[in-house]
């Protein structure tokens, strides 16, 4: 996931970076780019092809303010979630014009900005996400949310979905790198589980929504539980 922070105040830059990294580093590959001025952010989109999933954009009265930059960004990227921040209410209605996800007044608290970031995060991953599998004779795509878990079986990986099983040659560690940003956690040397399909965890076993029981290895239990707790907070807001 790519996030841009456009602000000239080091305090707010550090606050946002801390919230983002602390909240998601266990299972999400996040790349944060900082811009000091809105013009730099707009040019990055228009001339350098930069694209971000979420943009935190501070609005000030200057030659190219945040609203103008947001318009230019929106012209080349209709899907990015733009979160506007400002010390003034003067730009609220213009925020609607650029389809801003949120308009947040400064000074804001860590609790406030963390809550709004989590909402943006959940919306970003609410849409359908596709996963491509190359089998010996076919190329198959499926909805990532349909995958219950992946199991390593000798030199193959078995992807168990709500629609059946698919076997393909790969390493579980390779698939883990592809899927960890979508809520998957390695709970055992041989299992990678979609946390969205976990019904409950009892002692050293994970019970999935289809009643499958997956073991948690002792060496991975602490990290797996930490990842699952963060997943529940970030995806479900609890």
Image: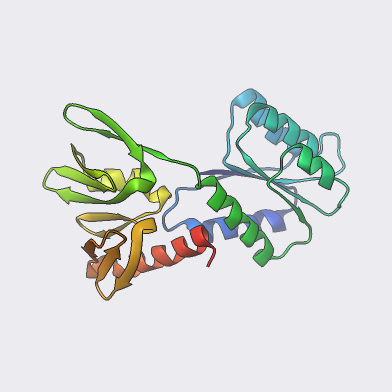
Q: Position of residue 121 (x, y in %)?
A: 55, 51
**x%, y% of residue 143?**
37, 41
Which of 155/237 is in front? 237
Looking at the image, the residue that sits furthest to the left is 154
Quadrant hosting residue 66: top right
Q: How is the image coloured?
A: rainbow
The residue drawn where x is 64% and y is 57% is 116
* Residue 196: image location, x then y, percent: 39, 57
Q: Residue at x 35, y 43 (%)?
A: 178
Up-down relation of residue 162 to residue 63 (above or below): below
Name the residue: 29% across, 74% down.
Answer: 202
> Residue 119: in sight, yes or no?
yes
Query: How many numbered markers are drawn?
Result: 0
Q: Quadrant of residue 17?
A: bottom right
x, y (%) of residue 55?
A: 64, 43
From the viewer's perspective, tell me whether residue 83 is left or right of residue 127: right
Q: Is 101 drawn above or below residue 213 in the view shown?
A: above
Q: In the image as oriented, which residue stretches furthest toward the top?
A: 47
**Closer to us: 83 or 141:** 141
Q: Is residue 135 left or right of residue 230?
A: left
**Left or right of residue 145, residue 80 in this image:** right
Res 66 visible: no
Q: Identify whether 220 is placed above or below 24.
A: below
Residue pictured at 71% horizontal, 34% vertical: 40
Q: Nearer the viewer, residue 215 or 12?
A: 215
């Amino acid at each position: 996931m790519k996030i841009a922070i456009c602000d000239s105040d080091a305090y707010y830059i550090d606050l946002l970076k801390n919230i983002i990294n602390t909240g998601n580093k266990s299972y999400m590959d996040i790349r944060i780019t900082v811009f000091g001025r809105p013009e730099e952010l707009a040019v990055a989109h228009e001339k350098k092809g930069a694209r971000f999933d979420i943009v935190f954009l501070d609005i000030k009265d200057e030659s190219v303010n945040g609203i103008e930059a947001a318009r230019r960004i929106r012209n080349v990227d209709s899907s990015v979630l733009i979160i506007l921040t400002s010390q003034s209410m003067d730009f609220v209605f213009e925020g609607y014009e650029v389809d801003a996800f949120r308009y947040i007044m400064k000074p804001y608290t860590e609790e406030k900005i963390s809550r709004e970031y989590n909402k943006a995060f959940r919306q970003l991953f609410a849409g359908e996400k596709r996963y491509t599998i190359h089998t010996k004779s076919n190329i198959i795509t499926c909805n990532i949310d349909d995958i219950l878990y992946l199991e390593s079986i000798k030199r193959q990986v078995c992807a168990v979905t709500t629609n059946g099983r698919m076997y393909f040659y790969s390493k579980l560690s390779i698939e883990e790198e592809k899927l960890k940003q979508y809520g998957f956690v390695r709970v055992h040397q041989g299992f990678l589980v979609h946390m969205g399909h976990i019904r409950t965890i009892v002692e050293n076993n994970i019970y999935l929504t289809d009643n499958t029981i997956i073991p948690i290895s002792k060496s991975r239990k602490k990290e797996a539980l930490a990842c699952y707790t963060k997943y529940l907070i970030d995806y479900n807001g609890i």
